[in-house]
Image: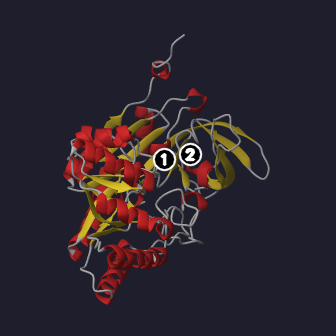
Amino acid sequence: MNSLTWENDILLFAKLPVLELARAYQTPLFVYDQDQILSRINEVKKIAKTYHNISIYYASKAFLTLAMAKIIKDSHLGIDVASRGELFIALKGNIQPSDILYHGNNKSIEDIHYAIEQGVRKFVVDSVDELMHMKELTDQINTHIEILIRIIPKIDDINTHKNITTGHHGSKFGIDMDLHLEQVASIIKEAEYLSFQGLHFHVGSQLFTNTFHLQAVEQVFKYMQQLRENYQIVIKEINIGGGFGIKYKEQDQPMPLQLFIEPIIKRIDDLAKIFKFPMPKISIEPGRFIVGGTALILYTVGAIKPGTPSSFVAIDGGMTENLRVALYQAQYDVICVNKTSHTLETYTVVGQACESTDLMVEHAKLPKLKRGDTLAFLQAGAYEHSLIHNFNKTLRPTVLMVHQGVERVIQQRETYEALIARDFE
């Protein structure tokens, strides 16, 4: 991680002593580096500026708080939301409704109506059923909205964990245009208030190659051809989603973002010329790329006991703050904050949840540990916080944001009273 340095055996994150943060704010503790977030945003914006026709929507499901919404607003990015809750936070963070793209595979009529009332005018349609409901609703309220149709690009054998692939034949996301193109086109042609802008796809997450995006682009142009030839519909925009991989472990070799995106843009440009389409606008949805490598989760060591093949070391959290390990066997580097040693022992790091799946890191090489030591999970900025839960009635942790060497609390630790705030006897 760029934010991590050792100085005189003291671990610094974003120029601040990590151990002092852990002691001051207690663990578990999330610590984000705002300067790294801004650096990643600027990298994306630089690429977009190079090609002139790229719009950026931050994929808020990766990490969203009011503070993150403000960063997105001040950075002049768009934001994509996939629920009414994410939309609510984006609006409370003063993001303009015109900068919001509303996703979701099961948006209710009430959700859509609420979004329109708030001024949101751009939606990604995920099913024929939703498309029909949008037509009926906009007819009733006489309000124009823009839509993208999310397609299933039907790309199998995507090289990532099966639980984070979304572009295969059996995906729950998107419309099978081989089956429903005529129905989709018919509704679009009849809809007075739906402005059809283009097609959207997302092939998967944490991808180290753009091969699957390039294949998806081919599918998009196949459907573009059919829409034009059979229904005189010409699209204006292609949204290629996100999925740009980052480095979690030493062996990970993600493509630099420019090298990832550049061939996709070229392929779109080439196909547009071949099929005599006007060059469409391109939009992207980076989430993990912007926040994934910008945070630590800090834990305190508790019980240590012998085990086979290695000793178990329990931490004061685990799957409650980081469900990614249990969900799709995500791997992390973990380090001891308060001691360095060239003599390392092998540990299995486990969480405190009453669940066998709360096994966080196997074969972790760490200095000899004792109760009270502080461990840091690296590259923990994307989805870890978003998946926090209260299993075993644990408290959701404090979240810090560090900017220019100064930390601030952007989310306070939950209280025990908050656990029963919604309860009735």
**Picture coordinates of residue 314 (x, y %)?**
65, 39
Name above or below for residue 254 compared with residue 320.
below
Question: On the picture, is 414 further left or further right than 340?
Answer: left
Residue with the most extreme bottom position: 274
Instruction: Please name the amino acid that badge 1 sits on.
Output: Glu
How crowded pointer 2 is (Cα within 10 Å; few <14, some 14-19, many 20+) is rated as many
Does residue 288 sit above or below 406 in this rendering?
A: below
User: Of 280 and 306, which appears nearest the observer?
Assistant: 280
Instruction: Mark yes or no: residue 188 visible.
Output: yes
> Disc 2, disc 1: CB below 8 Å?
yes
Q: Which residue is disc 1 drawn over? A: 384
Between residue 360 and residue 172, name the one nearer to us: 172
Residue density around tag 1, few if under 14, some if 14–19, many if 20 or more, within 10 Å: many
| Mark 2: amino acid | Leu
Q: Which residue is mark 2?
A: 323
Residue at (29% x, 72% y) in the render: 233
Judge whether residue 406 can be spotted in this image.
Answer: no
Sequence order check: which comes first, mark 2 or mark 1? 2
Where disc 1 sits, the SS reads loop
Residue 141 occupies quadrant: top left
Q: Residue at point 60% right, 55% down? A: 328
Which image quarter is the N terminus in?
bottom left
Say which element carries label 2.
Answer: loop
Q: Residue at x 30, y 83 (%)?
A: 272
Q: Position of residue 318 (x, y in %)?
A: 58, 41
